[in-house]
Amino acid sequence: MLSSKTILQAERRIRPFVRKTWLERSPLGQHVFVKLENLQHTGSFKVRGAMNKLLSLTDDEKARGVITASTGNHGAAVAYGLKTLSIKGRIVVPENASTTKVDAIRRLGAEVQFEGNDGVIAERYARTHAAQNGLTYISPYNDLEVVAGQGSIGVELSRQLENIDVVMVALGGGGLISGIASYLKAVSPETRVIACSPENSAVMDASVKAGKILDLESKPTLSDGTAGGVEAGAVTFDLVRKLVDDYVTVSEDEIKEGMRQFMNLHHMLLEGAAGMVVASYLKEREKLEGKKVVLVICGANIGLETLKQILT
């Protein structure tokens, strides 16, 4: 399992390279606070895990280089880390990847390579290429160094707010919630951790309930940052099973409403995965009445067309 000491070490390691994001009281509820990772470098919490992984590499590993596969926040986070630390590497993306997302990765100076027409194919290529060429593959969540980096959010929360009753976090592959929960449960065992998923892609949620990692089809969702399957043998599976207290799923209409309410009240952008957490709170609001609740607003990266769809 992941110790609080390991997470504290990660927090100290990445501190010069990431923003300590604001914890802001929210008009969403009387005792509701939002952790604004949408204001993090690259617009997402992902930079924390990517930086911790890159900083943990040996000089030899850095010299050989790294590779990852991602069309979104993880790819941008790794690209940011490569540029910041002057490490060579590349981001593998499927041929049908969004031009907007690929351009964002390229603006950070990363080498982009196209492989296949599906994210699974791109990831398989990246893993195989890494193994055959002595490169380090950086997983978006299936890596304890990455998870420890995400756990630095838990460290910040414990310093920013006392007596937190509930933390609500996007689930996805489990890297973010595993890191946060690993630290908070160590320093504040009474704090409840609630995992939030879209109904259209709740693979980890369903897997935990089944007691094994399932291979399930995902439908399209605004919460694209949490969409998709969970790798067989993922290190996050047992962490999620042990540390998460409750699970919530929300519909696409509920996600839209959550996004609209947040943008209206806080006057800033958020992506679907973050809106999904807001929606989960709104769904559970009556049960959480009187509780001190933190919502982790995990990212801001939303395309203009999607934003237009939400607002209209």
Image: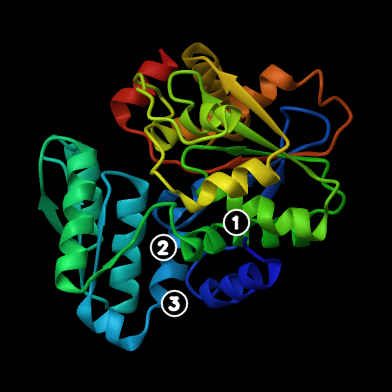
Percent of width and height locating residue 138? 34, 61
Give the position of the N terminus as an image quadrant.
bottom right
Q: Quadrant of residue 152?
A: bottom right
**Within-10-Å neighbours for mark 1: few <14, some 14–19, many 20+:** some
Q: Earlier in the sequence, mark 1 or mark 2?
A: 1
Looking at the picture, does residue 64 appear above or below residue 294? below
Can you identify the residue that label 1 sits on? 21
Colour mapping: rainbow
**Closer to the camera: disc 1 or disc 3?**
3
Q: Earlier in the sequence, mark 1 or mark 3?
A: 1
Q: Nearer the viewer, residue 76 or 27?
A: 76
What distance separates the C-alpha of mark 1 from that of mark 2?
17 Å
**Within-10-Å neighbours for mark 2: few <14, some 14–19, many 20+:** many
Q: Secondary structure at mark 2?
A: helix
What distance separates the C-alpha of mark 1 from that of mark 3?
23 Å
Mark 3–mark 2 contact, CB under 8 Å?
Answer: no
Q: Quadrant of residue 57?
A: bottom left
Give the position of the C terminus as an image quadrant.
top left
Percent of width and height locating residue 5? 68, 72
User: Which residue type carries mark 1?
Assistant: Thr
Can you identify the residue that label 3 sits on? 56
Can you identify the residue that label 2 sits on? 50
Instruction: Determine whether, in the image, residue 162 is placed left or right of residue 37.
Output: right
Q: Secondary structure at mark 1?
A: loop
Q: Nearer the viewer, residue 123 or 51?
A: 123
Looking at the picture, does residue 181 appear above or below residue 197? below
Q: Secondary structure at mark 3?
A: helix
